[in-house]
Image (cartoon, rainbow, N blue to C red):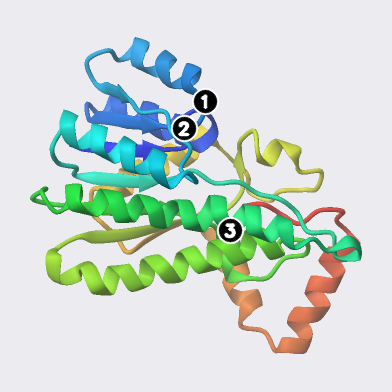
Amino acid sequence: MKIWLSGASSGLGQALALELLREGHQLAISARRQAPLQALAAQYPKQVLVLPCDLTDAEAVAAMAHQLSRHWGELDMAILNAGTCEYVDTSHYQHSVLERVIKANLFSASLCVQHLLPLLRHSANPHLVAVGSSVTYFPLPRAEAYGASKAALRYLFESLRVDLASENIAVTLVSPGFIDTPLTAQNDFPMPQQLSAEQAASYICRRLAKRPQEINFPALFIGVLKVLDCLPAPLRLAIGKHLSRNTTRSPQA
């Protein structure tokens, strides 16, 4: 398959890239940092197309998609993995934090959808994939910006799934728990059932072929979050307050 993957320079994106390349796919990889992308291309010189890009830049995304179109002419799968996390300090609330995170996690994804859908439409089995987060199942302290961006991403892709179904474009949302990445390495609180990036990538890739509506993991962690979200509102608030007292930052998952 011809696959485009964003956020491929480190963490889950890099692990996904290696897993997909080992499976023999043709892979176009994007990230702002070019050196790690070139290193992957050196390992797999006949399989990798390097397309460095800042996905928050509309002109850069358009140019990247144009280059992809000239090189391949079609796309079987697009995996929107790039994203970021910043925590909110409500004692000094700053709108700019929300603005930056939503731009990186939501608006960049929307730009990619705009420019990559035409290429997906040329595939016999097109597949659009977005990496969201398990944070959308239960509100966590200090995760206002990150959670809002991922909740919006969830709604966007679940609506796209409905509207693109008539074109046979499958839409999958990936909702992982904690993954050991450079981003989560900044967290200073316990991260239950944390997986390595390689474990997470392997889990995702094994399931993508079935074109599921959602891939979420690990099962126990996801199950606990869903149960917590079903509790009465006062109890959910009490649990959230307890978590807030015992963490200085909110979990990024």
Q: Is disc 1 surrounded by few (<14), some (14 to 19) or many (20+) residues within 10 Å? A: some
Which structural element holds mark 1?
A: loop
Residue lying at 32% horizontally and 37% vertically, measured from the top left: 63
Left or right of residue 152: residue 42: left
Who comes first in sequence, dot 3 or dot 2? 2
Residue lying at 24% horizontally and 21% vertically, measured from the top left: 47
Q: Of 138 and 73, which appears nearest the observer?
A: 73
Q: CA distance from mark 1 to mark 2?
A: 6 Å
Q: Is disc 2 surrounded by few (<14), some (14 to 19) or many (20+) residues within 10 Å? A: many
**Pointer 1 and pointer 2: residues touching (CB < 8 Å)?**
yes
- Marks counted in the figure total 3
- The residue that mark 1 highlights is 33
The tag on residue 31 is: 2
Q: Tag 3: residue type?
A: Ile
Residue lying at 35% horizontally and 45% vertically, measured from the top left: 79
Compared with residue 156, is residue 123 higher up or lower down, i.e. above or below? above
Q: Tag 2: residue type?
A: Ala
Q: Is residue 132 visible from the viewing direction of this image?
A: no
Compared with residue 68, is residue 108 higher up or lower down, i.e. above or below? below
Q: CA distance from mark 3 to mark 2?
A: 17 Å
The tag on residue 146 is: none
Left or right of residue 110: residue 66: left
Residue 172: x percent and y percent?
33, 58
The tag on residue 102 is: 3
Q: Of 60 and 26, which appears nearest the observer?
A: 60
